[in-house]
Each structure stands twice: as structure tokens, then as C-alpha cells.
Image (cartoon, rainbow, N blue to C red):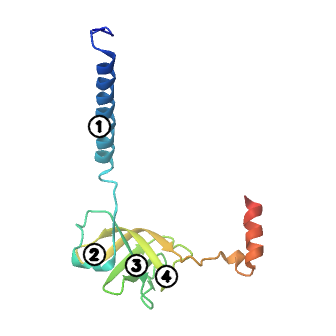
Amino acid sequence: MAVNGPAGIKAKHQRLVLLVIALVVVLGAGLLAAWALRSQASYFYVPSEIVAKPPSPDRAVRLGGMVVAGSLRTAPDGVTIAFVVGDGKARVPVRFAGIVPSLFVEGSGVVAEGKMTREGTFVADNLLAKHDENYVPREMQEMTREQAKTVVAETK
């Protein structure tokens, strides 16, 4: 029987031990990363889910849905807005203080990042306006498809 290595372990067993050690290290790194990011995770809710089972007030979540037409109100300070997000089944009042994205309008999709209050209002720290697949930048609205393709090709 041939014995390799300083500890008298066969080469086949050395490779097996190294494989097991590598697997344990990779698993440990994955668990450590998951544990470190646990508080950074932001869960996504639609209005009907957040109304049925609201998250705790200290938990950061994302609320996604459509801005209900006629619900957008600007506070006297000019910076704070209030609006309602709906999904056809439920509605959630939202309050946001800050710069509103240019695509944010009534009837459009929105994702609000923030926290739910005990009173049932969602206080957003950040707003992300969503657009449909037919979105065209203002600068390109007057162009034909061929002209737009040419402009895009030139910028690459």
C-alpha cells in the first residue's frame, strides 16, 4: 500500500478531505452572508397583502401598486405628498417627503420603500416610478422607430 503526504494519508483521501473542507468553507461563507444581510432585506407587498397582514412598524418593506387617480395631494410645505396605492382589491394611503421621480403620475405604477405606521399609513423613504414596456423618453417621442434605432446605435 502506497502512503502519500506528511500524515500518512493516501492521495485519494487527501482530495476527499480537501473537498469536504472547501464545501464547509463555502457553506459557512453563504450562511455568514445571509446572516449579515438579514436586516437589509426589504420585503415586497401589494396593497391587498399589506392590508390583510401588515408588517411590524419597525420593518422596512416595499409597497408596489398603481397610484389611484385623484388621490395625489401636495402638502403646503411643497415637499410632502400624499397619495393612495391600490391593486384593485385594496388601497393603502402613502406619505412621502422628498423629490418625486419625473415618471410619477396618477394612474402609473409605483414602488414605495418605507415603513407602515400603526395608523395604517405607509411612510415612504424612497419612490420608484414604474413605466410600461412602451415607454419612450421625451426626447425620442417625435422620432420614428428607425430614427430611434439609429440614435441608440450611435450612442453605443
Query: Around disc 3, counting alpha carbons within 10 Å, would you say few (fewer than 14), some (14 to 19), or many (20 or more)?
Result: many
Helix, strand, or loop for circle 2? helix
Q: Is residue 93 left or right of residue 75?
A: left
Q: Which label is found at residue 108?
A: 4
Helix, strand, or loop for circle 1? helix
Q: CA distance from mark 3 to mark 1?
A: 38 Å
Q: What residue does disc 1 label?
A: 28
The three-letter code of the residue at mark 3 reads Gly
**64 is higher (above) or lower (below) than 21:** below
**Identity of the residue furthest to the bottom in this view:** 70
Front residue (pair 111, 17): 17
Q: Earlier in the sequence, mark 2 or mark 3?
A: 2
Q: CA distance from mark 4 to mark 3?
A: 8 Å
**100 is higher (above) or lower (below) than 90:** above
Snapshot quadrant of residue 14? top left
Front residue (pair 6, 51): 6
Give the foreground label among 3 and 1: 1
**Residue located at (48% from left, 86% from top):** 107
Q: What residue does disc 3 label?
A: 65
Q: CA distance from mark 4 to mark 2?
A: 19 Å
